[in-house]
Image (cartoon, rainbow, N blue to C red):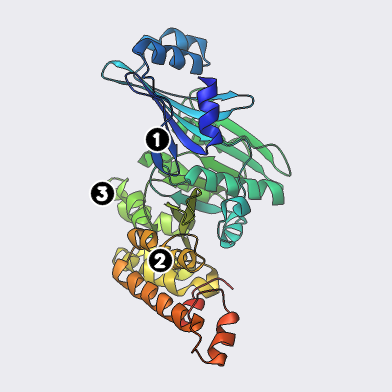
């Protein structure tokens, strides 16, 4: 088992699937590929599940488990977030690879504005996206930035603990749900009495947890958490909708005052076929953004505000970042178009980009045009260069 897992990690796998009646499979560059030819028996899968459960009491009641989360690690191989489940009355195991090295903004190639986001004294930072979009890595990079540059107490509540943060300039307390505390709600309420400056919650799953998280942000803490939402507007709507109807107006007001930033992301296959690149939408809560969040009728204006605020505040829409990735040949235009929020507008921009690129490289192009093009990132047009960070 260890040899197969190590081979998958060496190939850059993000997840491993181990299921009775099937071969070992791994998700590599977003695709689920087989690693072995021999199918696993139910007994083999059960034996692997027992091997991965560290808690002796849980291991003893394995036959009664239906859904189980834990972490597992082995020297020379890596650390993993493990989910053990039942399907067709036999076991299946899904293992998420957790790198030993804590990611940085540079290693993930994230926008420089995230350093500003991480420097906030208080408020709520929400990292959003679908499952497998890299939210945990981005949150870990934010925590790592704070740990490297500030002197604070960072407290994390995770299920299970993923990235292991050393005490550098900060004191980092990491608590695992089910091991160090009963659940997110209990752990978060207790956290407010443990003198934290920064609180990370693995996921906000219900209105009570969100309510306590808002209180933490309102009382001067910096709170970092995730939601399974695709963009800033949907994130605002989702948080408000998790409260009872009679509480939603005050919840919207509280969110507008407590929210500091929303970072939404998607992972796209790279043009060279080596791994995936992150495309991010970043919204920072200025006074104007807070007014739009506060007024339900104006919340839909947020995308246009983010679009217009790139130069002044460093915000960006998905489509702006996608155009950066296309211009720098990190992802193909076809991949970016499929992921864009406004495909028709994006397609027009791509056509303009290609037309100007051909004109700039043409031997009949005026000399002045060639010299002007050399002052901008390769392949960029006059109207698109203003969209890129300076």
User: Above or below — where is 386 with respect to 58?
Assistant: below
- Is 140 placed left or right of 309 in the picture? right
Nearer mark to the viewer, of 2 and 1: 1
Q: Which residue is the site of mark 3?
A: 245
Image quarter where the C terminus lies is bottom right
Q: Classify residue 117 by image quadrant.
A: bottom right
Residue 186, percent from left and from top: 47, 30
Residue 195, percent from left and from top: 63, 39
Are the residues tagged 1 and 3 within 8 Å (C-beta)? no
x 38%, y 57%: residue: 231
Are the residues tagged 2 and 1 within 8 Å (C-beta)? no
Secondary element type, mark 3: helix
Residue 222, percent from left and from top: 56, 49
| Front residue (pair 150, 58) | 58
Residue 218, percent from left and from top: 51, 51
Q: Earlier in the sequence, mark 2 or mark 1?
A: 1
- Asked whether residue 62 appears in the rendered view, the answer is yes
x 56%, y 42%: residue: 199
Nearer mark to the viewer, of 1 and 3: 1
Q: Earlier in the sequence, mark 1 or mark 3?
A: 1
Q: Earlier in the sequence, mark 2 or mark 3?
A: 3
- Neighbours of disc 3 within 10 Å: few (<14), some (14-19), many (20+): few
| Front residue (pair 270, 234) | 270
| Front residue (pair 182, 350) | 350
Q: Which residue is the site of mark 1?
A: 33
- Neighbours of disc 2 within 10 Å: few (<14), some (14-19), many (20+): many
User: Above or below — where is 46 with respect to 351?
Assistant: above
Q: Which residue is the site of mark 2?
A: 319
x 38%, y 37%: residue: 32
- Is 78 placed left or right of 87 in the picture? right
User: Above or below — where is 140 with respect to 87?
Assistant: below
């Amino acid at each position: 088992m260890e040899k197969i897992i190590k081979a998958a990690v060496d190939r850059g796998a993000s997840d491993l699937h181990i299921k009775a009646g099937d071969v070992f499979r791994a998700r590599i560059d977003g695709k689920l590929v087989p690693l072995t030819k021999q199918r696993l028996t139910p007994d083999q899968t059960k034996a692997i599940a027992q091997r991965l459960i560290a808690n002796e009491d849980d291991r003893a009641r394995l036959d009664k488990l239906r859904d189980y989360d834990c972490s597992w690690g082995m020297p020379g191989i890596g650390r993993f977030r493990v989910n053990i489940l039942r399907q067709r009355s036999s076991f299946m195991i899904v293992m998420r690879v957790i790198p030993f090295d804590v990611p940085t903004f540079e290693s993930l190639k994230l926008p420089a504005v995230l350093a500003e986001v991480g420097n906030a004294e208080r408020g709520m930072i929400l990292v959003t996206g679908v499952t497998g979009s890299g939210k945990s890595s981005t949150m870990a990079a934010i925590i790592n930035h704070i740990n490297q540059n500030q002197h604070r107490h960072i407290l994390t509540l995770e299920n299970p603990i993923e990235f292991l943060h050393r005490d550098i300039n900060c004191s980092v307390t990491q608590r695992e749900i089910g091991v160090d505390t009963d659940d997110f709600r209990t752990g978060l309420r207790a956290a407010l009495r443990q003198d934290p400056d920064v609180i990370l919650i693995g996921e906000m799953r219900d209105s009570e947890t969100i309510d306590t998280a808002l209180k933490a942000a309102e009382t001067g803490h910096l709170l970092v958490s995730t939601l399974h939402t695709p963009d800033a507007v949907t994130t605002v709507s989702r948080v408000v909708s998790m409260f009872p109807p009679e509480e939603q107006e005050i919840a919207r007001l509280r969110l507008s005052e407590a929210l500091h930033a929303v970072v939404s992301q998607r992972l796209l296959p790279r043009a060279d076929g080596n791994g995936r690149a992150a495309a991010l939408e970043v919204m920072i809560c200025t006074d104007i953004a807070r007014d739009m969040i506060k007024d339900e009728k104006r919340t839909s204006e947020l995308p246009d505000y983010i679009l217009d605020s790139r130069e002044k505040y460093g915000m960006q829409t998905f489509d702006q970042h996608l155009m950066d990735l296309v211009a720098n040949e990190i992802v193909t235009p076809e991949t970016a178009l499929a992921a864009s929020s406004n495909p028709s507008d994006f397609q027009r921009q791509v056509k303009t980009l290609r037309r100007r690129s051909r004109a700039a490289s043409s031997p009949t192009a005026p000399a002045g045009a060639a010299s002007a093009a050399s002052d901008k990132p390769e392949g960029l047009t006059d109207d698109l260069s203003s969209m890129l960070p300076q």
